[in-house]
Image (cartoon, grey):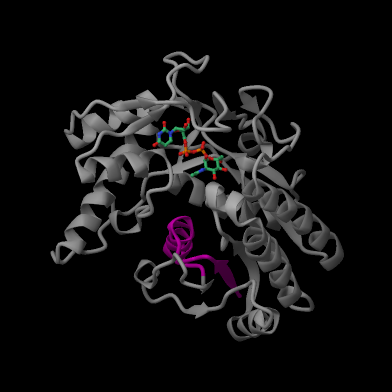
Amino acid sequence: MSILVTGGAGYIGSHVLRLLRDRGDDVVVIDDLSTGRLERIGDVPCVTINLAADDSPDLIAQVIAAYGVTAVIHLAAKKQVGESVERPGFYYRENVGGLANLFLGIEGTPVDRFVFSSSAAVYGSPASSTVREMDATQPVNPYGETKLAGEWLVRAAAHSLGIKTVSLRYFNVAGAGWPDLGDSKPLNLLTLAIAAIERGDQPVIFGDDFPTQDGTGVRDYVHVSDLAAAHLVALDGLAGGLEHDVFNVGTGTGASVREILAELQRVSGEDREPRITARRAGDPATVVADITRITQELSWRAERGVADMVESAWSAHLHERAGLAGVPVAPERA
Ligand code: UD1
């Protein structure tokens, strides 16, 4: 019996993988290595498959048979909001098509548990600052649409294939559980700010005139190790009787852009003042998870806060920089 982790060579997937390995589970990875990196997964077997390709269902079925897979954690997906607006067809093909092929590959196999990586992007610009799972889902970009369509497909497949499923709606993921597993792509606030510091530029604040405590956007930042742990409790919960199939994964507490950047100044010792620009189109003022459901039903709660996230992201950045400079770096623990 083993667990298939799609996207296991990615930033979040590699954290999930390491936690599964640490507790002694057998694992196998499917990853197309478009953004994933083999060095993140050590000696875990990895089969290179693009889930969206026509021949993937057969290949997936072969992997399931060869490794005795009975549970799947599906993270492989495209996740850039801006790119999804420019290339919606590509995003639907990769995220929805890839998931559809995955279920075609699962059909008729012993797989009976499935955890899907969804996103708070399914809520769009929420009407209230704290969002509950039963609130309206109105994504405002194709990326969020593909995650919502993914949840629908997961539900339909659960019904028709008789498997148990959970969709986890991630809020703003940050930090690193180990220095060698950092988020190396500058695509969100913390990684963009670190990249700016690295270039000798000022981090940028997209608007300081929001109706929030300090005028900057407020989000629910969750440490990637806490998020990874949520996958394991969800998987374990599926072995029992879960009441719901969708869970927010956040801390339940918001932090502003200014708070994150102040923490980064403290941790990095770089005192370059952020530059204020106009608001970014489509950015809501505040998005924070209501975590009642996951706390009550899965007994999961985030254990780490903003300081942990920023410190570990900075350590991972230094680790990567040392590696790029040719200094040998060991995959130590954070
Ligand atoms: C993030 C995810 C999105 C996910 C959503 C909810 C990214 C790129 N986007 O969106 O996929 O669906 O959470 O889970 O990871 N900001 C700045 N300066 C910067 C960058 C960002 O001020 O250089 C501000 C933004 O205006 C926002 C906050 O920082 O207030 C967070 O932005 P970002 O990290 O891009 O995440 P979200 O837009 O919340």
**Residue 251 visible in this rendered orientation of the protein:** yes
Q: Is residue 61 above or below residue 21?
A: below
Using residue 75 as the reference point, say whether residue 217 is left or right of it: left
Q: Is residue 184 above or below residue 97?
A: above
Query: Residue 206 lies in what quarter of the image?
Result: top left
Where are the magenta residues, as a range?
Answer: 1-25
**Residue 319 image point, x, y percent:** 22, 55
Q: Residue at x 50, y 30 (%)?
A: 219
The quadrant of the picture occupied by the N terminus is bottom right
Q: Residue at x 69, y 84 (%)?
A: 58
**Residue 203 image point, x, y percent:** 30, 34
Question: Foreground: 25 or 71?
Answer: 71
Q: Is residue 125 above or below residue 246?
A: above
Residue 24 is one of the magenta-drawn residues: yes
Query: Residue 62 lies in what quarter of the image?
Result: bottom right
Residue 315 is one of the magenta-drawn residues: no
**Residue 110 visible in this rendered orientation of the protein:** no
**Residue 298 image point, x, y percent:** 63, 43
Using residue 298 as the reference point, say whether residue 171 is left or right of it: left
Question: Foreground: 237 or 151?
Answer: 151
Using residue 279 as the reference point, say whether residue 65 is left or right of it: right
Question: Foreground: 124 or 204?
Answer: 204
Q: Residue at x 65, y 55 (%)?
A: 88
